[in-house]
Image (cartoon, rainbow, N blue to C red):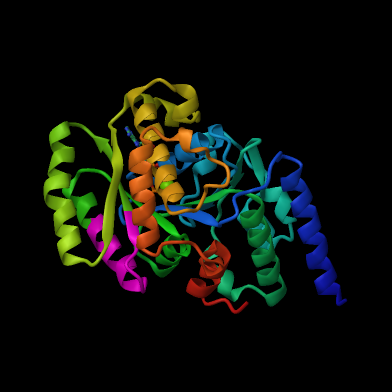
Amino acid sequence: MSDQAQELRKLRERLSSVLYSQSNRQPFKNKLSISFAGGKGGTGKTVLSVNVALSFAKNGIKTVLLDADVGLANANIILGIKPKKNWADFLYNNAPFEDILYFYNSNFILIPGASGISDAANLPSYKQEELLVSLDILESQTDILIIDVGAGIQDNIINFSIASNNIVVVTNPDPTALTDAYSFIKIISNRLSVVHKIYLVINMARSFDEVKRIYEVFIPMVKSRLNVNLEILGSISYSEEMVLSVKQSKPLLINYPRSGASRQIEIISNKLLENLYSQNRIQSILPKSHFNKPDEFEASRKEGSKSGLDITKSDSFVSRFCKFFGIKK
Ligand SMILES: Nc1ncnc2c1ncn2[C@@H]1O[C@H](COP(=O)(O)OP(=O)(O)OP(=O)(O)O)[C@@H](O)[C@H]1O
Ligand SMILES: [Mg+2]
């Protein structure tokens, strides 16, 4: 065995043991990834990624949050973590991959961001291998990978968004944010060959009317003009508790678990899980009783399998990442 192959085998073993030591069951069989994205800055992608990850973790789902915002990586700040190492240390300073995994709790791992991941295609080949092996192990030993994508429509942002097999577009009700969300959806739908389901979250809503207008005007317009299957996951009100939580570097779900915004985020997380579940993806661990409305669940499950969304191995984040970033495996 060559030196490099041996190194990679050792890397696999080390990572597996770090992840396995925190687990008491097998991970989901299918590979699930969700990116929180959207064209405009400051709409709440990061607070949502962090709090949804916390909600999943609370439900016993082993969740990894990858901070892929190469402009302003700040998921760690929202979580109150001061990471000693981040992506850049792994990519450029030879830090072992396990050193950039932060166990917020036994079910929630953060990979702190830094600029650099978008240049993955330009890395030396041994580093690319290490990156792919590490991501592959991470994906196969955990349940859900959440990607917090930065704002904008640059190539690397679009690539990160479509590397996941589920995309959540986060907007707020302002016309500028909706215009950016529209452009973003248009770009990603042009990049994806099959009609993809795209989820929408309306954040910082200040009135019911604002949300109603989006349902009545924005959604029909997107559906009629762009060939996408858009589903609203829910809305989150403008919340002083959220503002305070960010200032205090404590995630909302922990700081104010009973606030209206926390409840709305829990509803969104559960709906997301229900959707993934209905697509036959995570039946392995969640009991049907987890869901509030079993009948609806059955109906949507049938819908899910009809739409051909069942996951295949090629749907893994790693293979999509390679495909969209032009990395040869
Ligand atoms: N529901 C909410 N109510 C009140 N304030 C909110 C809410 N959601 C987010 N915010 C505020 O918006 C700010 C930006 O949120 P966040 O950093 O999650 O946005 P983002 O979309 O990730 O931004 P970027 O595009 O720069 O990555 C937060 O600091 C927070 O104060
Ligand atoms: Mg952000």
Q: Is residue 306 above or below residue 232?
A: below
- Quadrant of the image for the C terminus? bottom right
* Residue found 24% across the figure and 50% down from its top: 177
> In the displayed structure, does residue 279 sit left or right of residue 90?
left
Query: Residue 274: x and y, percent?
Result: 41, 43
On the image, the x and y values in percent for residue 309 come to: 41, 62
Say which quarter of the image contains residue 252.
top left
Q: Residue at x 34, y 49 (%)?
A: 300
Span shown in magenta: 180-198
Where, by quadrant of the figure, is residue 327 drawn? Answer: bottom right
Which residue is depicted at the point 67% across and 75% down? 124
Residue 95 vs residue 268, the one in the foreground: 268
In the rendered view, tell whether residue 316 sits above or below residue 202.
below
Q: Judge whether residue 188 is colored magenta.
A: yes
Q: Is residue 78 visible?
A: no
The x and y percentages for residue 283 are: 52, 47
Q: Is residue 204 visible?
A: yes
Q: Nearer the viewer, residue 195 or 258?
A: 195
In reply to whether residue 310 is colored magenta, the answer given is no
- Counting from the top left corner in percent of width and height, residue 199 is at 33, 51
Residue under the point 33% across and 41% down: 296
Q: Is residue 25 left or right of residue 298?
A: right
On-image quarter of the N terminus: bottom right
